[in-house]
Amino acid sequence: MDVVWENREAILIGFTHTVLLFLIAGIGSLLLGTVIAAMRVGPIGVLRVAAVIYVSLVRNTPLLMVLLLFRYGLPKLNIKFDFVDIVVPTTAGDIRLNNIFTACVIGLSIYTAAFVAEAIRSGINAVPLGQAEAARAIGLPFGGVMREVILPQAFRATVPPLASVQIALIKNTTVAGAVGVVEAFNVMRSMTNNYAGSRIEIFIAFALIFVVLVEVYSFAAHRLERRWRIA
């Protein structure tokens, strides 16, 4: 494990980018997925069809193709993501949130939102229909019914599937390394090229760190599920 320790600063920077990708794309996918789920159960037919097409198209497209579209395809059409250019210097190295990072965050958010929307829709369907009818009977519009009655219960019912989707997102961030983000997979690939004799140790070290990240998130999701169940 000497190679891993000697390169600890590069590994730290790589996993910092991984965690940032996960956190920002996780929040973005939750927001977008909630909107898509509301569109799918809403009263406007055009929006329902648009949501169905979005989920079917994105969910059946490989993630790498989505990231390649945002990283290389859209900039060719003059749709660029250079509105974010942040460099955070640290003692371990620079954390760079640039156009490549932004393109990957947007791509991951859009890809994951399709799965989030389906998870939330299953939670919406689990809410008794009578509650929505009662809310409408007292004059709440569709937005109010969703915000005040349906979505709070739907989120409580979908903590386990949402946690599974977000855990998949943690692992999917490694695809961003293929298009240039210096995240964990990118650092591991560089290390295995430079230290061919220590590949097993490097693989084990990176795998263990990913296991720790997933276990920490799983623990937090489990605690949240228990708290909401008691409440």
Image (tube, grey):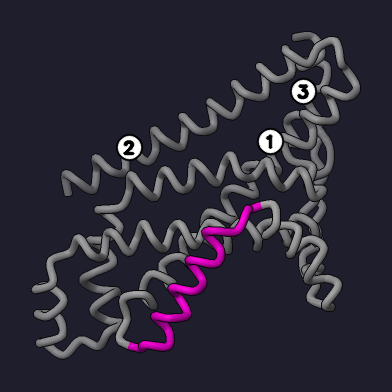
Where is 222 relative to 9, above or below? below
Where is 53 relative to 195, above or below? below
Q: Quadrant of residue 205?
A: top right
Measuring 78% from the left and 71% from the top, which residue is drawn there? Answer: 74
Residue toward you, 94 or 177: 177
Q: Position of residue 3 (x, y in %)?
A: 81, 14
Question: Disc 2 designates what residue?
Answer: 222
Question: Disc 3 designates what residue?
Answer: 8
Numbered label attached to residue 227: none
Dot 1 or dot 2: first in sequence order is 1
Task: Assign the magenta stretch its main secondary structure.
Answer: helix
Q: Is 83 within the magenta?
A: no
Question: Disc 1 designates what residue?
Answer: 15
Segment tinted magenta in the rendering: 44-63
Q: Badge 2, how many Cα within 10 Å: few under 14, some, many 20+?
A: some
Where is 183 relative to 205, above or below? below
How far apart marks 1 and 2 lie (CA) works out to 23 Å
Give the amino acid type for the residue marked by disc 1 in the picture: Phe
| SS of the residue under disc 1 | helix
